[in-house]
Amino acid sequence: MKIGHPQVRSAACVVLSALALSACGGPARTEVDVEIRLNSCNTQKASCLASGLSEAEISLVDADGQTIASGKSDDAGKLVLATGGAVGEARVIAVSPLIEGGRKEANLVLPREGETTNITIMANGSGTPSP
């Protein structure tokens, strides 16, 4: 086959497309960047400290309650969840025995394709008075 042949041109376009994606880091991911912070208050000193909560079970669920993505927060209380193409309203649910009531939820609108939404969830610690 010669270079001008349609099959050769198609193959060249596929190779160029693959190279362009790898050079740019691939297609942009659509994600929710979650941070869970736990309030710890000292009532004698009237002060509170919010620190990242590690090992919290975090779920991203759609409006129908279906799980889109889930995982555990890292040592800094952070986790990035891919939206898997889901759109619309959703909730982030954090579950840990260290959270007052065992869980904390927050509503959000999922990001558009290729974008990231950041959300920080502040939770009171179990047995910790409110600030």
Image (tube, helix red, strand yellow):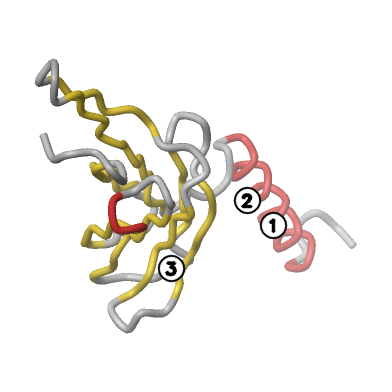
Quadrant of the image occupied by residue 49:
top left
The numbered disc on residue 85 is 3
Which residue extends farthest right?
1
Q: Amino acid at mark 1?
A: Val
Question: Looking at the image, which is closer to me, 48 or 32?
Answer: 48
Residue 77 image position (x, y, % from top left):
42, 36
Please tell me whether mark 1 sits on a helix, a strand or a loop.
helix
Quadrant location, the N terminus: bottom right
Residue 101 image position (x, y, % from top left):
29, 58
Q: Amino acid at mark 2?
A: Ser
Q: Amino acid at mark 3?
A: Gly
The residue to which callout 1 is attached is: 14
Q: Residue at x 24, y 43 (%)?
A: 124
Quadrant location, the C terminus: top left
Quadrant of the image occupied by residue 85:
bottom left
Q: Residue at x 39, y 45 (%)?
A: 98
Question: Looking at the image, which is closer to me, 33 or 74?
Answer: 74
Please tell me whether mark 3 sits on a helix, a strand or a loop.
loop
Residue mark closest to the camera, 3 vs 2: 3
Decide: is 79 above or below 5: above
